[in-house]
């Protein structure tokens, strides 16, 4: 189900009828055309593990596994919920939108895996440890007194260090198990990045000791240039550090630069970088780049310019599994799914075998609806479909399929207070406007844009996402909504959602299955399957 084209190295068919196995492959960027921001990667033997940011979604901090740096599969999450509080239970108007888990650093040392990140909603730094990265469990500590934004760990000669910061990067030593700042240690200013002429100063640190040098790889954004990967190096961990731009340029006809992510050495001695590209509504997508060492500097791409096609000197193995279809025929939820905030009570895959059951809790709308289940969308274009059985819904309930971000739209079933059932398309989005003084502002639209009577109990629901146009007349970052009573003849609403990657949510668009109550809790929405198709 690989959605971004992989051109595998041609296998030689020998005269004797034998087939040679490919020893390399050509990856076409983006590596995976979906939202995987702030990646960090480690290699343990021949296994590669990647972690990324999922913010307020739960479970959070997905661990992905690969054997070839190209195909990635989710194998675990670091936590089920950061804190079981009002924020993650969406109570009293509180939430973690745009916050939550950010920019995890992942390391392996002496048989233990370490993951450290901040949660902006909690204003805390968390350290997790496990002996088994695939199965867990993870042990947790809170590092008191420090908020280590975009941190990176380094085990070095029996000591554990961490670099973090935004603009100014700091260094401090941790206890050997990472549970706290080392007794008596004080943070020091390590790197002060330039202050004038920048849209974004240094952040997103990745800290390494390679050969004679300590390296701090970071993202910055010079004014009038694209986002940039810059690396700092010193032969002394405390500095002073000198810097060099190692990747700067655009890719795929977009103006967005590619930066923030790790470098990693393969078991064959080759080096690669995975850096993400801001790609509009679909999110921040990972791109693979070769690394060539030039005078002790890890230059990415071709002389620091991003490449669209990259030869990877590893045989192709595995599959992509960061999004998928689901027939809901298991008694466990597939790893590709994440809840909007904490997983609710009352959902089930066993009460009606072969169906996902969502039980409604009180909400005012999609943003505070507990029990909303999400999965990444995929570019350049994809279609998400579900079959909903609304027979168990109660008066005041709403259930269906949503294009989920700050500017959202949902198509589904609404039950009126008198028990009548309607097909409803509802938009909740920010739109550009101008105030009385002529200055630009935004207004919130929260309105039905299409309503019709529901015929029967079951309805097919569809969202068609276009992120990168491929045909005349298509517009980028646009979603269309339709429904059907037989899965063959579709009725499309004369409406399109203009999707925006907005910083108040800070995640790419997801397809979301929802069910919430406005009157009485306990109503049931059953989903027979979820299908997502890239085209």
Image: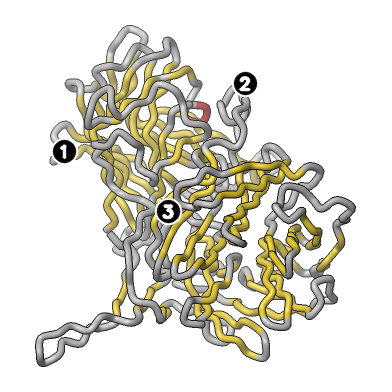
As drawn, the residue found furthest toward the top would be: 418
Front position in the image: 304 or 329: 329
Q: Residues within 10 Å of mark 2 (few under 14, many from 20)?
A: few
Residue beneath disc 1: 487
Q: Residue at x 79, y 47 (%)?
A: 146
The residue under label 2 is: 92
Above or below, 436 relative to 45: above
Against 62, residue 348 (above or below) is above
| Image x and y of residue 399, in percent | 35, 26
The nearer-to-camera label among 1 and 3 is 1
Q: CA distance from mark 3 to mark 2?
A: 33 Å
| Category of crowding for the residue at label 1, using alpha-carbon neighbours closer than 10 angstroms: few (below 14), some (14–19), many (at least 20) | some
Asked if disc 3 and disc 2 are in contact, CB closer than 8 Å, the reply is no
Where is residue 39 drawn, in percent x and y? Answer: 55, 60
| Residue 191 as seen in the image, left or right of residue 25 | right
* Most foreground residue, 69 or 338: 69
Q: CA distance from mark 2 to mark 1?
A: 40 Å
Q: Secondary structure at mark 3?
A: loop
x, y percent for residue 415: 33, 16
Q: Residue at x 60, y 47 (%)?
A: 503
Residue 432 seen from this side: no
Residue matched to label 3: 477
Q: Residue at x 42, y 10 (%)?
A: 520
Quote the CA–CA distance across marks 1 and 3: 25 Å
Q: Element type at marker 1?
A: loop
Residue 295, placed above or below residue 525: below
Q: Earlier in the sequence, mark 2 or mark 1?
A: 2
Single out the mark in the foreground, 2 or 1: 2
């Amino acid at each position: 189900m690989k959605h971004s084209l992989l051109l595998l190295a041609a296998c030689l068919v020998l005269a004797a009828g034998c087939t040679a196995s490919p020893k390399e492959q050509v990856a076409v960027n983006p590596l995976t055309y979906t939202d995987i921001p702030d990646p960090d990667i480690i290699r343990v033997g021949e296994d590669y593990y990647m972690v990324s940011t999922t913010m307020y979604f739960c479970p959070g901090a997905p661990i992905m596994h690969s054997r070839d740096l190209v195909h990635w599969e989710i194998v675990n999450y670091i936590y089920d919920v950061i804190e079981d509080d009002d924020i993650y239970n969406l109570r009293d108007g509180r939430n973690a939108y745009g916050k939550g888990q950010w920019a995890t650093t992942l390391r392996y040392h002496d048989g233990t895996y370490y993951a450290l990140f901040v949660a902006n909603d909690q204003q805390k730094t968390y350290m997790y440890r496990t002996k088994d990265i695939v199965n867990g469990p993870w042990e947790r500590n809170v590092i008191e007194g420090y908020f280590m934004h975009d941190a990176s760990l380094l085990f070095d000669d029996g000591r554990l260090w961490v670099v973090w910061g935004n603009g100014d990067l700091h260094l401090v030593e941790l206890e050997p198990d990472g549970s706290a700042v080392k007794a008596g240690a004080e943070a020091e200013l390590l790197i002060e990045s330039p202050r004038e002429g920048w849209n974004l100063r240094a952040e997103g640190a990745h800290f390494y000791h390679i050969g004679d040098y300590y390296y701090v790889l970071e993202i910055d954004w010079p004014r009038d240039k694209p986002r940039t990967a810059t690396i700092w190096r010193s032969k002394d961990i405390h500095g002073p550090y000198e810097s060099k731009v190692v990747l700067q340029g655009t890719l795929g006809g977009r103006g967005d630069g590619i930066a923030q992510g790790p470098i990693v050495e393969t078991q064959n001695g080759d080096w690669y970088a995975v850096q993400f590209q801001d790609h509009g509504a679909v999110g921040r997508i990972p791109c693979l780049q070769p690394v060539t060492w030039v005078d002790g500097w890890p230059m990415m791409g071709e002389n620091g310019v991003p490449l669209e096609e990259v030869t990877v000197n590893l045989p192709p193995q595995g599959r992509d599994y960061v999004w998928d279809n689901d027939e809901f025929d298991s008694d466990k939820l597939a790893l590709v799914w994440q809840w909007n905030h904490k997983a609710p009570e009352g959902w089930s895959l066993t009460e009606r075998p072969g169906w996902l059951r969502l039980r409604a809790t009180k909400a005012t709308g999609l943003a505070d609806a507990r029990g909303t289940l999400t999965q990444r969308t995929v570019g350049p274009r994809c279609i998400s479909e579900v079959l909903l059985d609304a027979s168990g819904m109660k008066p005041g309930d709403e259930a269906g399929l949503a294009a989920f971000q700050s500017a959202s739209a949902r198509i589904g079933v609404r039950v009126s207070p008198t028990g009548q059932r309607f097909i409803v398309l509802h938009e909740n989005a920010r739109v550009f406007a101008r105030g009385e003084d002529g200055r630009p502002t935004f207004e919130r639209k929260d309105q039905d844009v299409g309503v019709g009577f529901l015929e029967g109990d079951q309805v097919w629901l569809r969202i068609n996402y276009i992120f990168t146009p491929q045909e005349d007349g298509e517009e980028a970052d646009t979603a269309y909504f339709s429904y059907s009573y037989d899965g063959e003849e579709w009725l499309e609403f004369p409406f399109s959602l203009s999707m925006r990657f907005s910083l108040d949510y800070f995640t790419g668009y997801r397809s979301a299955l929802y069910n919430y109550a406005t009157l009485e809790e306990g109503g049931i929405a059953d989903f027979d399957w979820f299908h997502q198709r890239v085209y």
